[in-house]
Image (cartoon, rainbow, N blue to C red):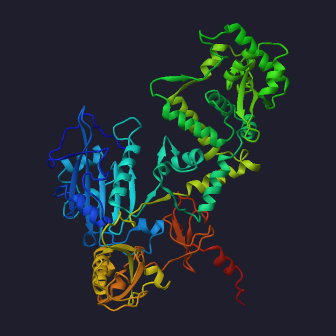
Amino acid sequence: MSQLDLTGCKKRKRGDRVFRFKTFGEKGYPAEFKGSFRENVAALLEFGHIESNMSCGMLCWSFQLELHSHPPAHILLFVVEEPIGASTHRHCNHCKYVGWGHHMICNRKYHFVVPSRETEAVFGHDSNYEGPDSRKGERSIVGVEGHAMHGVIHSNGFGHLLCVNGLEMGSDLAGRHIMDFWDRLCTSLRARKVSIYDISQKKGMDLRLLHGVAYSKPWFGRWGYGFGRGSFGVTQPMYQKAIDAIQGMPLCLLIHHLGSSNHDIPLIFSRYQTLSDHSLVTVGNLFHFMLELKSRLPKETCLDSYNPGISVETTCRWSPKRVEMAARVIVEALRRAEFRWVSRQEVRDAARAYIGDTGLLDFVLKSLGNHIVGNYLVRRSLNPVTKVLEYCLEDISTVFPSDEGLAMNDSKLKARYKITRIQLMKDMFYLYKNILKEQKQTVATGIFSTIPVAARVILDTKYLIKEYCGGQPSEVKVGLKLYCTVVSRNNDEDDDGIEKALPPFECIIFKDNSTVNELKLEVERNFREIYWGLRSFCVESIVNLNAKGSDLVFGLVEAGSELLFEGNDSKVGINNEGIYESGHNNCTVDCPCGAKDDDGERMISCDICEVWQHTRCAQIPNNEEIPHIFLCNQCEQEIILFPSLP
């Protein structure tokens, strides 16, 4: 994580205006965003301060953003416009790996960078810095790693969030603050779709696995990012089934299975069950409760989860002695039930044989859930079928090592249940490691063998996507709104047919008195501005509209209709340069895991058939070099079956 020292940060002398970080990008601040992504970016940059010598000759603007005024703390947002001519890498691998390789290369892409303390110092003080994208000693802020935030959006509205490096929760610039800021930018600028390569970790735990089990979605899911594309052939149904499998694993079975060889797991579970006001039944319940508790627990203080009975207020009508006696009677009634779940009415009836005060019994039953009485934890839960409260006992003496058992005194037992934020993180990491990530072979048996398999599927889901409303402009009061796309007749780069070459539909607004010829010219202008491969595109006809050039558009088509324009590009040999983000991809991927496309994972090709597959699927560990000669299983079997020479 980047370490930003913002508390004493003074205002930088960049322009005259300072914007509020927490509202930057909201409607009307700093500009009215009513058009397409390209138009909205242009409107935003009018408020920026033009920078020089920041990005290898590319245009760059900066914005001062105020985190808070007392004490003063500011950060900088840089926006860099990267034209295709200045790109060192014309094709976008991020598009390729997330499944947008069929998109045409855009003329421009815009980088949104919030530098960290370290990366800002590079450009503020080191004039001799030469980054990976530098040319002749010039510096490029987009070529440096370690920013607090770095996102890039192509001129067609499709983008990628490349990094988020926030501080701990409670700081001036935590990760959630950065994500709020990025989400506001994408929404206001009317981005279309944005991807994230999610490999984020916290204290050695993969957040996509931890939050997937706890919340059914990754950490980025709280901002609407969800399954985009899985690596190693993982599909959306596989991903969802993997989450459901781990979430629904019963804790009682898991603790029984692990308790004999690992005393710490039952102890940890008991520790947090005493804090919860409802029963933690599944693995998902436990991790969800621990994460929610972490968000509420102060860093400095601790929470005492040990409840040796019921705390009686001074206003209570019964004395502490009578309350304690009633609690022990109820526990004894539950103990005679042989640790099965018993309804509230059944417990109440059994206890009335010894205590006639039904008011006292109702008070104790209401207060007794998830409390410790003697050597027992009283668990309370609402039956999901009958909707009736039920009670059950758990013998907590069994969660301690055998040499302690019932002999543990009250002070020792209470010390076991002191919860601090540090202790909670240690417990969470222990459960994560021993249940989700690194189960021993003896543990991963029977139904528990699904846990490591499901965890692997979740970890292989790294590409997340959020769909914004960029294709749907704000309300149009005047004019006709149409969705248009184009196809070039001389574009034969792909063998998959015309559909792959179609760019996403662009929403274009026309006046009511526009003619078909004016419509064609407007479509030409828009698509030439967006796509490098269409920079000299000329519309010749409308495929799904039969009309003359002088005809009025209004009346021929309905508002919101989709139109396909066909034409030619006068640039000869443009296809040889590769106009799609995937480039000249003549490689064939056919991996045993089911993958048919390059997903960014390490691959190897067969030296005979030249078909690519994952090194992991070929049983080649990541810490080993790729062999000089490799044969896939199919070619290897065919060689074995070759007839021997005479």
In the depicted structure, whether residue 289 falls above or below residue 458: above
Q: Which residue is drawn at 37% across and 75% down?
A: 482
Camera-side residue of 16 and 201: 16
Q: Residue 451: x and y, percent?
A: 67, 49
In the depicted structure, whether residue 86 falls above or below residue 318: below
Q: Residue 486: x and y, percent?
A: 38, 82
Using residue 604 as the reference point, say whether residue 521 is left or right of it: left
In the depicted structure, whether residue 430 falls above or below residue 466: above
Asked if residue 110 shows in the view, the reply is yes
Residue 287: quarter of image: top right
Q: Residue 53: x and y, percent?
A: 17, 58
Using residue 380 as the reference point, say whether residue 44 is left or right of it: left
Q: Quadrant of the C terminus?
A: bottom right
Total marks in image = 0
Camera-side residue of 251 and 365: 365
Q: Residue at x 31, y 80 (%)?
A: 523
